[in-house]
Amino acid sequence: MRKNNLSDRLNKILLLTSDVLLLLASIMIANLLYFNSPTMWISLREITFIVPISILLVTIVFFYFLDLYADWIRRSISKFVINIILSLLLSSALTLVVFSLLQIQNIPSIAVCLTLIFQLILIIGSRVLYWSLLKYYKGQKNMLIIGSGSKHDGELVYKVLNHNKGWFIIQNFIPVYKEINLIDNIQDTDIVLLCPSLSYTEKSEIISQCSSRGIEVMVIPELTDLFILESNPQQIDDTFVLSIKPVEITSIQRHLKRAFDLLISSFIIVLCSPIFLVLFIIIPLTSKGPALYKQERLGENENPYHIYKFRSMVEEAERLTGPALAIDNDPRITRVGRWIRSTRMDELPQLFNIIKGDMSLVGPRPERAFFINQFRNDIPNYSYRMSVKPGLTGLAQTLSNYTTSVEDKLRYDVFYIKNYSLSLDLKILIQTLSVMLQRNQAEGIKNLDKDLEDKLKNVLDQKDVEAITQTR
């Protein structure tokens, strides 16, 4: 553990040092081209000598909030590139705003734009090289997947197959009901992925066997495992225990969160007022019905309230079907609705729910009582997510897709509640901008069965495919 932590810290220091040097180089190249002097901004009098430092600090802060110093292993390079572009655009825009407010006129906008261009070239180039080296040296890991042979196991195999190419090679899938010697099967394996359908005893035995042979094990955590993550080691007499304390958002945190919600929501409403106006006109013109609709949801402590959204479906979409989640290529979604859903603009009216106090900017996704009752019957501790106000955005919305299972989204919600802080809220808000640029995350629930079966046939035996794609 200590070795991994040290390696992680060294990687972050390396990335940070590289970013600082490349950002400074971008500023110097832009100065050289525009002012014929690589240190022109530094030599200028008045307040402008702090311009390079300010640009550096602001850019590094955006890099941090968009997870550019997180672990890059087994992640998509496209998401990182989008986050780099967004970080640099935000920092450049903020720089121009500050220049305007401070009336700094001896540094023209064209010089800032030149700096941005060279930043994009140098930072993206260095990060793509870094990611490629990581993938070359730490990719292509042989993976053995062990499960019970349920349909949910098949969906997990499907996710591995769809994961960023080049990181995992599925060696085999072993259902535990087969009489197979585990030790023989893990000899040439780099990673063992355990499906959540396995029992605690089965997981413990496999983890023990793998640990003794230096093989990495990947486990999908139960909710209780997430609570243990933040536990404190203690001792009762000579017995080692873990103390799991209840999560409590302090009164000061609640007041700070409320003030943050009011300030940012009011700012976004003013900033997006032209978008509100355009959508109020376009939606009724392109499909029958009003621009807005309201629907009852359950909020903090299951208190009901009415949520406001821009209408993205045909009027009375659930009149014949009753409450139903959206699916991929849902015929109920209008042409304009498809676009505003993919960019999350249909959520904008919820800003007024935040002003009213029904919601927060960041929190678990608000849900209807109909679905909550269903989920609560199937998933233990589902109600835990309603111990805080629902949010316009949240950790589950930024790290998962619309098609992500309820169980997986609940894991993100619990992790957010357990690790709440104002800085985490700010980080999630900034990452939401990145999500809005990646439209695939807002797609409806997909029917995986046919595509799943075709992909599984290339990896598994026909018997295993049948066992997985049909509920046993």
Image (cartoon, grey):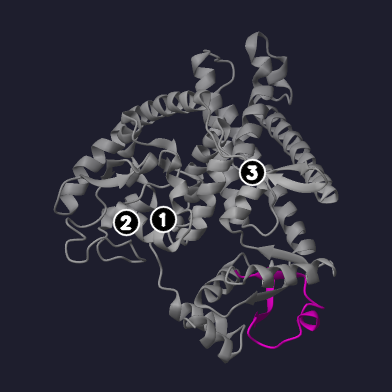
Position of 258 with respect to 104 (left or right) is left
Q: Are marks 1 and 3 in contact (CB under 8 Å)?
A: no
Q: Disc 1 residue type?
A: Ala
Spatial distance from mark 1 to mark 2, Cα to Cα? 9 Å
Position of 100 with respect to 302 (left or right) is right
Q: Which residue ends up furthest to the left in the rendered image?
A: 288
Q: Position of residue 126 (x, y in %)?
A: 72, 47
The residue segment tinted magenta is 168-195
Q: Is residue 436 visible?
A: no
The mark closer to the camera, 1 or 2, is: 1
Q: Which one is in front, 84 or 445?
A: 445
Position of 71 with respect to 221 (left or right) is right
Q: Disc 2 residue type?
A: Arg
Q: Is residue 405 visible?
A: yes
Closer to the chain start, of discs 1 and 3, is 3
SS state under label 3: loop
The mark closer to the camera, 1 or 3, is: 3
Closer to the chain start, of discs 2 and 3, is 3
Q: Disc 3 residue type?
A: Ile
Closer to the chain start, of discs 1 and 2, is 2
Spatial distance from mark 1 to mark 3, Cα to Cα? 35 Å
Residue 73 within the segment the image draws in magenta? no
Residue 188 within the segment the image draws in magenta? yes
What number is the disc on residue 256?
A: none
What number is the disc on residue 338?
A: 2
Question: Disc 3 designates what residue?
Answer: 244
Q: Position of residue 19 (x, y in %)?
A: 72, 38
Who's the residue at 59% across and 72% down the image? 161
Q: Position of residue 328 (x, y in %)?
A: 37, 66
SS state under label 2: helix
What number is the disc on residue 442?
A: 1
